[in-house]
Each structure stands twice: as C-alpha cells, then as structure tokens.
Image: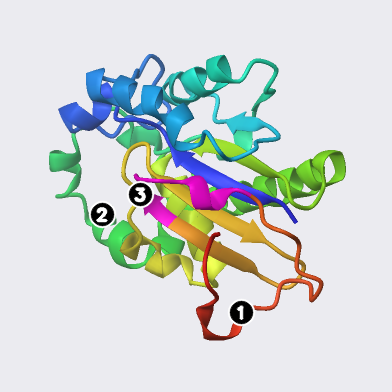
Amino acid sequence: MATLILVRHGRSTANTSGVLAGRTPGVALDERGTAQAAALPGRLARVPLAAVVSSPLQRCRETVRPLLDARPGLPLHVEDRINECDYGDWSGRKLAELMDEPLMKVVQAHASAAAFPGGESMRAMQARAVDAVHDWNSRIEAEHGEDAAYVMCTHGDIVKALVADALGLHLDLFQRIQADPCSVTAIRYTPLRPFLLRLGDTGDLDALAPRESSADGGAAEVGGGAGAP
C-alpha cells in the first residue's frame, strides 16, 4: 500500500509564545517555521509524490505551500479529520498554566481517558486520524499504485497518535513519541502491517523514494536489510 509521509507543521507563533493554539484561527508560522517550510521541497526533492493532504489550519497550509509551489500540478486536498485536537476550553491558554490542571496528569499518563472540557477526547482524536489515513491510503493506491507516496501535513498530537497506532502501542504510551516542528515521519503500509521508516526526521529524506514492491506482501527483511540504495 501507500507510503505516508507525515509532516508536522513548521514552528508557529503559538509555539514560540507557549500557547496551546488548538483550532484557534489565525495562528501562522513564525520566522523559523517559514524557513523550515521553505526547506521542505529540497528535503523531499527525490521522493515522487502523488498528493499533499493538509489539515485545514493556516499553519499547516503555510507549511506545504513551498512544496506545492515547487511542484506545479501536485494536488492539495484539505482533510478535516487530521485537524488539530479540539482542546475546547484549553485552546488559547498558556501551557505553563495548564500544567497545574488536574487533567494534565491524565493527558500525560492515561491519554485514553483524557477528554478536554468543551472539546474532544484523545481517543476520538486518534480514531478520526487513523480512519483518515486508511481512507487516503486506499485512495492513493487506487489512483497511483501501491508504491505511491503522499504527504500529510498535520499537528504534533496527531502525528504521535498515528505513530502509536502504526506501532501497535496503546494510546496511553503516545506521549513517549516526539514530533518536532516540520519533522518528517514516514510509515509504509502493507497488507499485513505498517513499517515505521522515519520518526521525527529533520535531515536527509532521499531514502524515502519508493523501492521495488516485495512479492511477499510486506514481510520484514531478516537482519534488518541493507537500507536504501
């Protein structure tokens, strides 16, 4: 099946001000985030891409804009199901003050039980994002073949939740995963299992270029394999 290239949006003005932005409108990339986005086309230059799928929020659409400008004709699809977690009443508040909220301990250690007042639960967040990925995997494969790769630009908690799902980790463990701004996480899906190819990568991504399909339906290479050519 398709290779999913997850990109967390570049650093935003909310990141630098220590605010939990959530779905607050008008949160843009800061100067560093803009530079990170500008570097993304070069990092992915040798990876054929079938499409770009983005969260509807401004910071994600700003992150993929240089990539789209560098590849005229590359389609952009906006996907509501990979929107930021709906933090409800927590949205727009300082992270420092949220650390004193009793719910924060639940978010950190027992995420599957966490539900934000006026917002959504973390279980619901993960479920909608996983459903979106499976739907897009099927669509990309049907339209472009099983070796196709596509970019999905989304948010930190969404990236971590998708990685946890791919690794078979309980959501309660997803806080052990790190996804820095404009980092790339790549997951290759097969009929039997997903393979995590990159996690939070901020360097060379040439090795994500598709290789010949395996006739065994996605068995792991004994000994770990030789890596990319």
**Rendered image: mark on residue 179:** 3
Q: Which residue is mark 2?
A: 104
Disc 3 versus disc 2: distance between alpha carbons? 19 Å
10 Å neighbourhood of mark 1: few (<14), some, or many (≥20)? few
**Rendered image: mark on residue 17:** none
The structure residue drawn at horizontal position 18% and vertical position 33%, both measured from the top left corner, is 18
Which segment did they paint magenta? 199-209
- The kind of residue tagged 1 is Glu
In the image, 202: left or right of 96?
Answer: right
The structure residue drawn at horizontal position 81% and vertical position 40%, both measured from the top left corner, is 144
| Mark with earlier residue (1, 3) | 3
Q: Is residue 142 above or below residue 61?
A: below
Q: Nearer the viewer, residue 20 or 176?
A: 176
* Circle 3 SS class: loop
Q: Nearer the viewer, residue 95 or 37?
A: 37
| Mark with earlier residue (2, 1) | 2
Disc 2 versus disc 1: distance between alpha carbons? 41 Å
